[in-house]
Image (cartoon, helix red, strand yellow):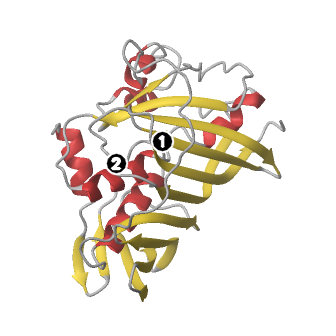
Amino acid sequence: MSQVLNELVSLLSLEPIELGLFRGQSQDIGLGHVFGGQVMGQALSAARQTVKPGRMVHSFHAYFLRAGDEQQPIVYDVEIMRDGGSFSARRVKAIQKGQPIFYMTCSFQKPEAGFSHHASMPQVVGPEGLMDQHLLAMTMQDKVPPKILEAFVAEVPIEMRLVEPLDLIAPAVTEPVRHVWMRVNGSLPADTCVHEYLLAYASDFNFLVTAAQPHGVSLLTPGMRFATIDHAMWFHRPVNFNEWLLYSIDSPNAGGGRGFVRGQFFNQAAELVASTTQEGLMRYKGGK
């Protein structure tokens, strides 16, 4: 396991405080606030520690209420809503400075056989030969402020390769579609839960920004602001994040200062392993 991946796995391994209460540390990845994927991964980790062994997460629904302080730890308060014969439901409140910054409701299920079908995987080129986002950032080193560049070129725990590379400095108007190959930078243990926490973390990358593509703006456009409002995720099949996964994203709508995006994760056997949706704030001070 690489050092940066080990640090991320440790970040998602929370400190128990007392029954139903956990503390997680925060990570500064250069956004000026806590990354939403970190909070989702930690909240899922907190909830899982209150569920009986053998039950796996199949969905979660989350709301982001306040921006988190990346310099402060986060306390996770897990409420046991129900433990039934097949399903367990939990609600998690993330707290900083005495105020809730995030809520998640999640559900776990014991393994069960049943009918099976899934969407077809998009026909795109494979990850081999594509530049990762680290190398793409190096091509912008003379165009972005040093602090931003430092965040982009630092070693990352999750490698990401865009099928359709985008110019973040002078973005062209394109269809609201994005395909990203992802895998961890290193090797994870077989524990399925860790793979799920990390996939929840990774699902917030390259997501809401897809809704900005038809408008010719990007994360680095001066005056552009993005912020997640809510995020939902469904786990359909076991996840192996040691192998490449294709994140297929589209945005069917933007309006009212909000963008809406959908995503699907496929493994290299072309199986749909997880689905995501998100709506977020998407404001441009220049008036677009």
Q: Quadrant of residue 65?
A: bottom right
Q: Which mark is residue 44?
A: none
Query: x, y (%) of residue 104?
Result: 50, 71
Question: 116 and 244: which one is in front?
Answer: 116
**Residue 24, above or below 157:** below
Taking 202 as reference, is 276 left or right? right
Q: Nearer the viewer, residue 80 or 149?
A: 80
Q: CA distance from mark 1 to mark 2?
A: 9 Å
Q: Residue at x 65, y 38 (%)?
A: 250
In the rendered image, which residue does mark 2 sit on?
Answer: 239
Find out whether the residues at labels 1 and 2 contact each other: C-beta distance under 8 Å: yes
As helix, strand or loop, the secondary structure at mark 2 comes to loop
Q: In percent of the image, x 44 and y 60: which residue is there? A: 40
Residue tagged 1 = 265
Q: Quadrant of the C terminus?
A: top right
Identify the image quadrant of the N terminus. top left
Q: Amino acid at mark 1?
A: Phe
Residue 18: percent from the left, percent from the top? Answer: 24, 86
How far across and down, in percent of the image, does residue 135 sit? 39, 17
Relative vertical location of residue 218 with respect to residue 82 in this rendering, above or below: above
Q: Residue at 39% across / 80% down in the picture?
A: 77
Task: Name the residue nearer the viewer: 97 or 1.
Answer: 1
Q: Is residue 34 above or below residue 161?
A: below
Q: Secondary structure at mark 1?
A: strand
Does residue 72 appear anywhere in the picture? Answer: no
